[in-house]
Image (cartoon, helix red, strand yellow):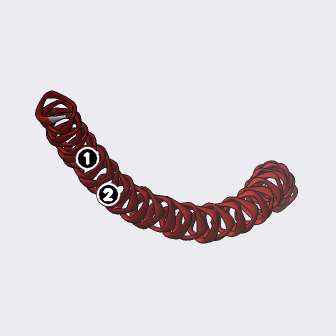
Amino acid sequence: VDNNSNNKNNNNTTSNSNTNVGNNRHHQIVGTLLSEIHTLERTLQTTESHRTSAENAFVTSEARNAHYESQLRTLARRNIQLRNDISAGIAHHHRGASLSNEIRQLDRALQQANR
């Protein structure tokens, strides 16, 4: 009877020991998982922060791009105005040269008429 009692006690001790090992292992796994969850949460926060920064940079870039496009349109209009002004200036120059020639011819005709 004592042997049976000892065996039962030994079995209970072994069972309790196994349970403790199992519980310790379970706590280790839970601790590791919680640590990994916290790491993932921090990574997610960092990723969200980077995404927000990238979105803000994109919005700023789009605004800057729109501003540059507006400046380009203004410069293109100014370029057309300058080309038109140059063409008009050349036309005036040619007209002026033509008038100068006419005046010289009239001067010569007057000089000859006065002789």
Q: At x 14% / y 41%, what residue is drawn?
A: 13
69 horizontally vs 48: left or right: right
Q: Position of residue 100 (x, y in %)?
A: 76, 55
Q: Residues within 10 Å of mark 1 (few under 14, many from 20)?
A: few
Identify which amino acid the numbered label 2 is placed on: Leu
Secondary structure beneath disc 2?
A: helix
In the orientation shown, which residue stands out farthest toward the front? 1
Residue 20, how many percent across, how many down? 19, 47
Q: Residue at x 43, y 58 (%)?
A: 44
Q: Is residue 63 above or below residue 38?
A: below
Q: Is residue 78 left or right of residue 16?
A: right
Is 89 or 109 nearer to us in this picture? 89
User: Where residue 83 sits in the image (x, y, percent)?
Assistant: 76, 53
In the picture, measured across the screen, residue 21 lies left or right of residue 56, that is left
Measure the C-alpha gap from mark 1 to mark 2: 5 Å
Could you tell me if residue 54 is visible in this image? yes
Q: Give amino acid for label 1.
A: Thr
**Vertical relation: 90 (above or below) 8:** below
- Residue position for label 2: 34
Q: Which residue sits at x=34%, y=49%? A: 33
Q: Which residue is mark 1?
A: 32
In the rendered view of the protein, which quadrant contains the C terminus?
Answer: bottom right
Q: Quadrant of residue 79?
A: bottom right
The reply to whether discs 1 and 2 touch (Cβ–Cβ < 8 Å) is yes
